[in-house]
Amino acid sequence: MAPALREQLFTADAWQRLSRLADPVLVERPGDRTALAAALADADVLVTGWGTARLDAELLASAPRLGLLAHTGGAVSPYATQAVFDRGVRVTQAGAAMARPVAEVALAFTLALLHRIHRFDHALRGGVPWSRAGTAPERHQILGCPIGVIGASRTGRAYIELVRALGAEVTVADPYLGPAEAAALGVRVAGLDELLATSRITVVHAPALAETRHLLGRRELALLPDGAGLVNTARSWLVDEAALLDELRTGRLDAALDVYDAEPLPVEHPLRTLPNVLLTPHQAAATVEGRQALGDSTVAEIERHLGGRDLLHQVGREALERVE
């Protein structure tokens, strides 16, 4: 990975721990397949970051000793291939460390939508007179607020913990969440349609799989009540962006988004102009503490691997089905 990213992910302490285990070699241009192949010749472990060349059969041929691919992010599909699993290389990722910062951003988005903060900010920055800048749809507090969570993922569960601590009433749509787990989380389980129709704020935390493409399409978005808000810090893959844009243009809904079909989001994109939309540039997980947690998690997995122990965050071939 690039040196700047390594410095964000690995504290001095984490780098010392890693250096006690082995002699780290830094490939500074992660997309350079030639440099990566040279480094892999003597490598027991490959640590990947965003932009690392995909480890296909050709690169694996240069890595006779490789036993572990440790990704410092979540989705491994851009970096691993079936050939990696065919070779018996273990694969781990640090996605669990992203759950808390992303959940906190989703909470911040939730509060902003409930209190229409984005609308007030847009009005004042746009030169709207004070007397009209305070005009907005009804505002609500989170205490007793009906919130729908799509997907009881790691991030979904971290978000549920935060909003329930503030008094929200949470409903979850997740086909894999059983009654016992739901009770432990303190949530109600419902089908997607019911969740959408009864939630003041709907938050998307589902995985990006082939079957979840446009999970929220035109029909589903129409089920959201007037004045409701949609939060998406997961993947734009899950929401039909064109359908959402049509709904937002009517002013019927508000949305807070960190992810988009086109990234970078084009300067001329209509989402940038709407007063009922809060936008951030795909930065929900990028806290100082979050980045360092990714590095700490990665080093801990390498320690377990070299010590012959089970990995905490190992993934199998099914991880290749997830969309980055």
Image: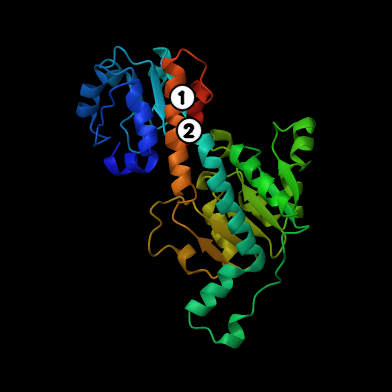
Please determine whether, in this image, residue 61 is positioned above or below residue 107: above
Task: From the viewer's perspective, tell me whether residue 308 is left or right of residue 207.
Answer: left
Task: From the viewer's perspective, tell me whether residue 29 is left or right of residue 103.
Answer: left
Residue 94, numbered circle = 2
Residue 85, numbered circle = none
Residue 280 rendering spot, x and y as whole percentages: 47, 58
The residue that mark 1 highlights is 301
Of marks 1 and 2, which one's residue comes earlier in the chain? 2
Residue 186 rendering spot, x and y as whole percentages: 77, 42
Q: Residue at x 28, y 16 (%)?
A: 63
Please determine whether, in this image, residue 55 is positioned above or below residue 4: above
Asked whether disc 1 touches disc 2, contact meaning CB atoms under 8 Å apart, the reply is: yes
User: Callout 1 environment at 10 Å: few (<14), some (14 to 19), or many (20+)?
Assistant: many
Is residue 55 visible in the rendered image? The answer is: no
How far apart are labels 1 and 2 at the CA level? 9 Å
Q: Residue at x 39, y 65 (%)?
A: 268
Considering depth in this image, is 187 or 81 the residue closer to the camera? 187
Residue 27 rendering spot, x and y as whole percentages: 25, 32
Task: From the viewer's perspective, tell me whether residue 110 is left or right of residue 121.
Answer: right
